[in-house]
Structures are given as C-alpha cells and as structure tokens.
Amino acid sequence: MKFWRAYDIDIIKLNEGEHTFTFHVDDEFFGKFEGNDWVSKGDLTANVRINKLASLIEAYFDIEGKVNLTCDRSLEKFDHPLSTSEKVLYKYGHEEQEISDEIFMITRDTPRINVAQLIYEYIILAIPAKKIHPEYIYEMDDEDFEGEGDVVYSSGQNFEKDDSDPEISEESNEKIDPRWEALKNLNKKD
C-alpha cells in the first residue's frame, strides 16, 4: 500500500496553476504489476506536470530512461533507451469514471489521483514491437524482413482443376456463367 501512495498526487491541495512532480521508476515498480511479461527491469524518471484550471486538470507525462528488454532475434538482454510524452485530462463531473484513454472524469472533492498505472501503460506503449539488440540491428538483411508488408488474400476457393465439374473451362480454369457458354459455342464451326 505504501508503494502505491508514492505515486499519488494530492490534487485537492493544489492551487490553480502549474505544478511538477517527479517519480522514479525502477525494478520494484515493474514487479508490482501482475502479468507483466514486457519489462521486469528499468531505470526511468517520470516527470508529471499538472496544470490545474477551474474546470479541468491537464497532466503532461514526460518519461525518460532505459528499460531492459529481451532481443527477439538472439534472446539476449539489452538496455533500450526510452523517451515518451503523453497528455491526460481530468474533467470534473458527478462521478469518477474513465471516458477514454486520455480523458478521466473526477469529482470536485476527489482528494488525489494515482499516476502509477498511467506511467506503466505509457512505458509499455513506448516499447518497440520488434525488439532487436543494438549489435544486430545493422546486421539484418532482407531475409529478416521477408514477408513483411505483403498482403495475402484467399477467398476460400480451391483453384485446382476438377474435371468432373462441367462449369470449369479447360482453357482458363475458371467457372463460366452458363449464359456465356452459349456465346462461346457461336464461334465454333462444326
């Protein structure tokens, strides 16, 4: 419980205007999130700038540091530099709820907001989809990207020739509409 309180911002005590809070993100932080398979180690600093206005609160998150990742290619551990910036709005309303990923509704008497979950989510979103160790990133050739960007479409039809089906043309392996079959026979001379 004490751990989570370290990421609280007492918004009820804040005067209107800008306020900055700094949070340290380390291995203990990542260990508190269940099901975290992305990152287990890191050393980051999260600066949260709060701009308290009469009708809402703007929160700007600037997170910088490094996270320890596992290379998708070699399975080696490496430190990846990470830098991300995000913005969240806290609007005043009748009840506390999440309106969207960037907008939260809070009541006017909400004493504090906890930013731990948001910091965690922003770190996870900033991790690249393909995690490659820096030693291998320049050694990659076209084979490593084979198939990327290709579009494959399958209609589910079997395109093999079936001699038992009279509607399949021998010349093109395509089904011919029976109405056109009569026109095809006009060109043939018996």
Image: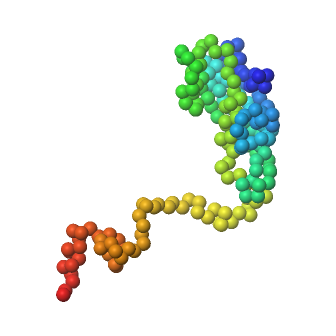
Q: Say which residue appears at 24% left-offset and 69% top-offset.
A: 178
x, y percent for residue 113: 67, 21
| Number of marks in the rendered image | 0
The image quarter in which residue 14 lies: top right
Please give left or right for residue 72 compared with residue 94 in the image. right
Quarter placement of the C terminus: bottom left
Quarter placement of the N terminus: top right
Q: Say which residue appears at 77% left-offset and 55% top-offset.
A: 75
- Answer yes or no: is residue 138 visible: yes
Q: Specify the color scheme.
A: rainbow
17 up-or-down from 174: above or below: above
Please give left or right for residue 183 compared with residue 17 in the image. left
Front position in the image: 181 or 65: 181
x, y percent for residue 128: 68, 48
x, y percent for residue 164: 34, 74
Please give left or right for residue 113 compared with residue 152 in the image. right
Q: Say which residue appears at 71% left-offset and 43% top-offset.
A: 38
- Answer yes or no: is residue 172 visible: no
The image quarter in which residue 58 lies: top right
Question: In the displayed image of the protein, which residue is found farthest to the front?
Answer: 164
The image quarter in which residue 67 lies: top right
Q: Say which residue appears at 67% left-offset and 36% top-offset.
A: 121
39 up-or-down from 186: above or below: above
